[in-house]
Image: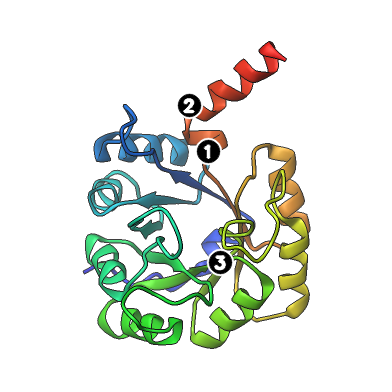
Amino acid sequence: MTLKLTNLDVLKGQLIVSAQAYPGEPMRDPRTTAQVAASAVIGGAAAVRVQGIADIQFTRSAVEVPVIGLWKDGHDGVFITPTLRHALACANAGAHIVAIDGTRRPRPDGLDLAATIAGIHAESNALVMADCGSPADAAAAAEAGADLLGTTLAGYSGERTKTQGPDLDMLAQIVAADLGLPLIAEGRIHTPAQARQALDAGAFAVVVGTAITHPASITGWFKDALSA
């Protein structure tokens, strides 16, 4: 079992890179994920975030930084590490931090968020990052025992309108609530300037995924600009 991450200060003010590919894409391979993650670390990533049990295992072997692991199961509703079973599988695969759906929506296994987090803490050494969709989610996740909060689901859980870039207003509201936990900015951060804005707005650290690790999307942005 992975050693417990005890010093979150290694992430303070830092960049976390999410390395993921969608099913059916050429890069949807755990070995590729690990190589992309390792390349991001060379570039300065203080931690990486990966999806899938094999991806977590391969990435743990490829990098020396903290690994945030998750398991997406489904496409709608609660699908980011939706149950305690999924979460423990991520922890057992080597994730230092397990990212789970941190919204107030019903979970597929019937457990509430507090019971899920308590189960992860009781049965593994992993910390828990609650991926939230609103300030109310963040407050509830803090009360439920999460170790870190994320803005990952802003605009995706039905509570807030999806913004063009990162939801800095939601970030500011959570910061103002002073919940006492590290708040990770994640979601639609596509430029270095936006990453800086998130940090300046009070984020503890910033996650960037698509803009760094998803060539199909990045290529599409350039193609669209040339076609306009």
Query: Which residue is denoted by mark 3 in the rendering?
Result: 9
Residue 167 x, y percent position in the rendering? 71, 55
Q: Which residue is mark 1?
A: 210
Mark toward the start of the polypeptide (3 vs 1): 3
* Between 202 and 209, the one nearer to me in the picture: 209
| Labels 3, 1: front one | 1
Q: Which residue is mark 2?
A: 215
The quadrant of the rendering that contains the N terminus is: bottom left
- Rendered position, 25 above or below 114: above
Left/right placement of residue 111 relative to residue 88 reads: right
- Dividing the picture into quarters, in which one does residue 78 lie? bottom left
In the rendered image, residue 20, in percent from the top left (x then y), is placed at 40, 42
Label 2 to label 3, Cα distance in Å?
A: 31 Å
Single out the residue that lies furthest toward the top: 226
Image height of 47 relative to 128, above or below: above
The span from disc 3 to disc 1 (Cα, nearest Å) is 25 Å
Q: Please, what secondary structure does the residue beneath circle 1 have? A: helix
